[in-house]
Amino acid sequence: MRLAIDAMGGDNAPKEIVLGAMKAIQAFSDIEITLVGHEEKINEFLINKERIQILHTDEVILGTDEPVRAVRRKKNASMVLAAKLVHDGEADACISAGNTGALMAAGLFVVGRIEGIDRPALSPTLPTINGDGFTLLDVGANVDAKPQNLLQYAIMGSIYCEKVRSISKPRVGLLNIGTEEKKGSELTKNTYKLLEKADLHFVGNVEARDLLDGVCDVAVTDGFTGNMVLKTVEGTAMSVFQMLKAALSSNLKSKLAAAVLMPNLKQLKSKMDYSEYGGAGLFGLKAPVIKAHGSSDANSIYNAVRQAREMVNKNVTGKIKEAIEKEIIEE
């Protein structure tokens, strides 16, 4: 299996990207990795070159670049070349921690959409209190959506959870302002009717406050709402840990208590870190494209590689294609 990684994308590139790639190579004997980026800078950290090759380029898409324009004009950018390796059949999947909008554009324009998919969805798996996690889509690939789009999100999320997260009959929930069937906007009301008829384990409307309690395995919503939920969960977790840190360092007694509690707090922090589940998959493309967090460290990149490997091995793209074709025929 061949994976392409944008070595220059993200806040900690290329160091953490390279370290994560080396860690993945040690863990998985069936993968080869192409690091795309500035060869000299990559080689500063590339100690083990076993099954790792470099595709050199000195062009990079920055976080401040306008996504579509950057992908079209910077054709030799590390992110674009990583996507091109997938398009050309030289890689089975690609990963980047760089500009999210640019990666979505590269996915659409370079890798390409599965026929029948109206709009791909960006989908991370977020933590739950019981540690199982839930897959949320869409979180920003499309600000606006139609009921048919949300139905396709539900199908793709369900397949991903079944094949990659090994969940039998994933519970699909529609994110709404109440659990009652008649609640919500025209979008959610019409989507509810479609999901009710679909060949899915649909558990009805779910509220945002219940997501971390594990009310469903797949939460479906439009990209605007999904991005708000994602940023709220992320921001709340960071704020809680900052408040805990301040409280536990306020005086000598607190510091002593912190020393005792430190192993438990580290375990809790790890449990709430959604990078442990991998990156956000861009579902609906002809091959797996994974968006790692912009501040990814080596462990985050390793988990993104693990996720991409699972998606290739379990043929998630092929299963989505089959399900969408079946949906079109039944219509």
Image (cartoon, rainbow, N blue to C red):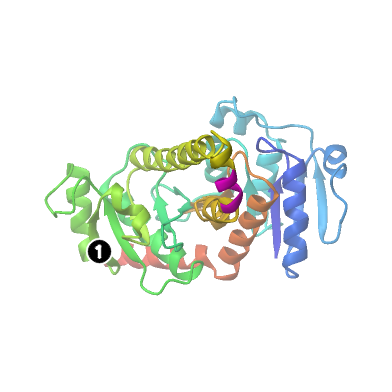
Q: Residue at x 60, y 55 (%)?
A: 263
Q: Is residue 228 above or below residue 178?
A: above
Residue 303 located left or right of residue 163: right
Q: Residue at x 31, y 51 (%)?
A: 150
Locate residue 236, reporting x and y percent: 43, 39
Residue 63 located left or right of residue 322: right
Q: Which residues are magenta?
A: 256-260
Which image quarter holds the N terminus?
Answer: bottom right
Q: Nearer the viewer, residue 53 or 241?
A: 241
Locate residue 136, reporting x and y percent: 40, 52
Which image quarter holds the C terminus?
Answer: bottom left
Graded by Cα atoms within 10 Å as few (under 14), some (14 to 19) or many (20 or more), the crowding at tag 1 reads: some
Q: Residue at x 48, y 72 (%)?
A: 166
- Look at the image and tell me whether residue 252 can be seen: yes
Label 1: state its secondary structure. Answer: strand
Magenta-colored segment: predominant secondary structure: helix
> Which residue is farthest left?
182
Q: Splitting the image into 4 quarters, where does residue 66 fall?
A: top right
The residue identified by callout 1 is 203
